Image: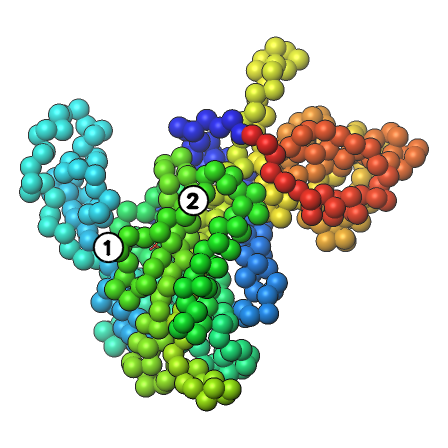
Amino acid sequence: MNKPEPDLMERVVSLCKRRGFIFQASEIYGGLGSCYDYGPLGVELKRNVKEAWWAAMVTSRRDVVGLDSAILQSPKVWEASGHLSGFSDPMVDCRECKARFRADDLEGRVCPNRRFKKRPATECRDAGFFTEPRQFNLMFKTFMGPVEDSASIVYLRPETAQGIFTNFLNVQGSSRLKPPFGIAQIGKSFRNEITPGNFVFRMREFEQMEMEFFVPPAEDEKWYEYWVAERLRWYVDLGVDPEKLRLRPHGEDELAHYSAGCTDVEYLFPFGWSELEGIARRTDYDLKRHSEASGTRLVFWDEETKERYTPYVVEPAAGVDRAAMTFLVDAFEEQELGVDKKGRPDTRTVLHFHPRIAPITVAVFPLVKRDGMPERADEIEADLRAEGFRTFYDEKGAIGRRYRRQDEIGTPWCVTVDGRTLEDGTVTLRDRDSMEQERLPATELSARLREALRNWSRPPD
Ligand code: ATP
């Protein structure tokens, strides 16, 4: 697909606001740093992302079950997991403009704010320009109960995974699953990021989709390889350009001390290759830490072999917002279609979403607002809605403009009721990607759409 890379992000952000996908949080008050609200189309997009993940990770399998643990947990959880002492980034302040940065984000010794000033950058090239790095804990703190003292401090979870580890026995005992088995969770996490940015790529409040897969220690490498491949495939199956996806194994120096390996799934965003999700070998670290700290032995008792062991863990951890942003950026295209009737360049903005990801699956229009067409279109829309399709009805404006409005939000199909519909019961079905139309009886629509949904493939570049 022919994409204008440099300002692609700006175009996507502007489309998101204009069409109601994503808004700045507290916008009427000037916004709140790196917090975003999802609008009517954005919530549907996000729901589709989560449903596709849940289907792939939980409901299509026998060996994974779900969980929804609390955002607030005992502070002892974060002490045992190492988040209280170790979940921090090195932070430096610019001595001149007081802006704060993640030390490992800075490319040179010059404050990035400098670049926008007229004075030559050489003026501030001195080693003491930034403060010495200090460790900054990324967890948000609040107080539980009426007294605001150190004994009542609780933290907003920085990841969903720990709620899974602390419930290992509850879930294993009640579901009677044996390793290898997994526990999956989708939910909000909070990180007081020092340098958030790139739209919903790095936010302070975001949503994660994490799964902890518990395996016999000897099978850990096998399952790691399995999940790395599965997770990459998930994005490809949902229509993301395989050429813009890659796997990046972490170097030894990037790994946490307990980790036996980690691979990131990365996407080529307009701002460069960046992590979409990580698949990590967490060994038995978390279950052992919580066993020691809580005094409850988080182990598996194998009735067949009469052996007790601490399972190893393979963790695919993804972000809902990063996935949603990937689908938006990857689907975005501005197509030059020659010139319009008045000789002006005709540009079509289109989101080539996979139909499972698109907020609306099918839009229904009467060609004109008379002769019984609106009534018939209304009936067809109601029938498709009752069949479970996400539908949209629109009778306003020229038909060509109505198609374009749907293209811009990624609706894969549009159905139009015209004069012939009232005579022979047929309608036109327009395809978003090819813009081709076919005629078929309205009664065959739902079967035809189901088939198209099953067979959909990414349009060629
Ligand atoms: P990064 O290196 O980008 O900070 P991370 O390696 O700390 O990410 P994990 O702790 O592995 O991230 O979290 C798993 C996933 O959660 C990430 O791959 C990402 O999709 C998502 N995620 C993490 N932090 C954020 C954030 N601040 N905003 C949006 N999504 C996030």
Amino acid type assigned to the residue bearing label 1 in the image = Asp
Q: Quick one: 363 or 110, which is closer to the camera?
A: 110
Dividing the image into four equal quarters, which quarter contains ligand 1?
A: bottom left
Q: In this view, does 393 lie above or below 278?
A: above
- Cα distance, mark 1 to mark 2? 20 Å
Image point (72%, 43%), residue name: 452
> Can residue 120 be spotted in the picture?
yes
Q: Quick one: 8 or 405, which is closer to the camera?
A: 8
User: Is residue 23 found left or right of 293 in the rendered image?
Assistant: right
Q: Which residue lies furthest to the top in this view?
A: 343
Q: Is residue 326 above or below residue 14?
A: below
User: Is residue 289 found left or right of 19 in the rendered image?
Assistant: left
Q: In this view, does 461 lie above or below 411?
A: above
Residue 302 place in picture, x, y as percent: 47, 84
Residue 39 place in picture, x, y as percent: 53, 46
Image point (17%, 24%), residue name: 118
Q: Name the residue under label 2.
A: 246
Residue 167 place in picture, x, y as percent: 44, 77
Q: Quick one: 401 or 270, which is closer to the camera?
A: 270
Q: Quick one: 362 or 393, which is closer to the camera?
A: 362
Q: What label sits on residue 253 in the rendered view?
A: 1
Image point (61%, 34%), residue name: 459
Which SS class for mark 1?
helix
Residue 155 place in picture, x, y as percent: 32, 67
Which SS class for mark 2?
strand
